[in-house]
Image (tube, helix red, strand yellow):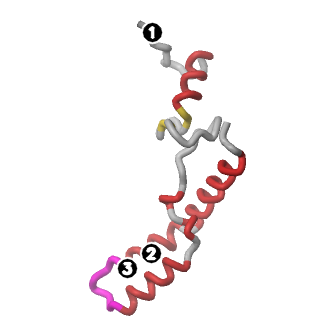
Amino acid sequence: MAKLSSVNKNNRRIKLSDRYFRKRQQLKKIIMNKKLTLEERFKAQQKLSKLPRNSSKTRVMNRCQITGRPHGVYRKLKISRIALRQLGLQGKIPGLVKSSW
């Protein structure tokens, strides 16, 4: 199990990134628009930098939903390789069979 504080911190980052997603997207469109004046683009850049750092999508860590483990997480399942193996051995994931040779 991961530290509860790190899991909670990541959950806060997810909420912040969801809250500011549209605003960040609009500001990025303004910044990338070459037809606008340099002043307008610069103001948009300043507004973007004023937003909380944790509102960025890249700050969110992919963590296992069961254990909170940060590494070895399958994106589609959102669980770690270790949790996947345990659930597979218990027979809770249909179609998953432990391989042995």
- In the rendered structure, which disc, 1 or 2, sits on the residue that comes first in sequence? 2
Residue 83 occupies quadrant? top right
Q: Are marks 3 and 2 in contact (CB under 8 Å)?
A: no
**Above or below, 5 relative to 2:** below
Q: Nearer the viewer, mark 3 or mark 1?
A: 1
Against 88, residue 76 (above or below) is below
The residue labelled by disc 3 is 31
Q: Which mark is residue 100?
A: 1
The magenta stretch is 30-38
Residue at screen point 56% across, 35% down:
79
Q: Is residue 11 magenta?
A: no
State the residue in front, 76 or 82.
82
- The reply to whether callout 3 and callout 1 are in contact (CB within 8 Å) is no
Image quarter of residue 1? top right
Q: Identify whether 38 is placed above or below 97.
A: below
Per the image, the residue denoted by label 2 is: 26
Judged by depth in the image, the label closer to the viewer, 1 or 2, is 1
Residue at (55%, 69%) from the top-left corner? 53
The amino acid at mark 3 is Ile
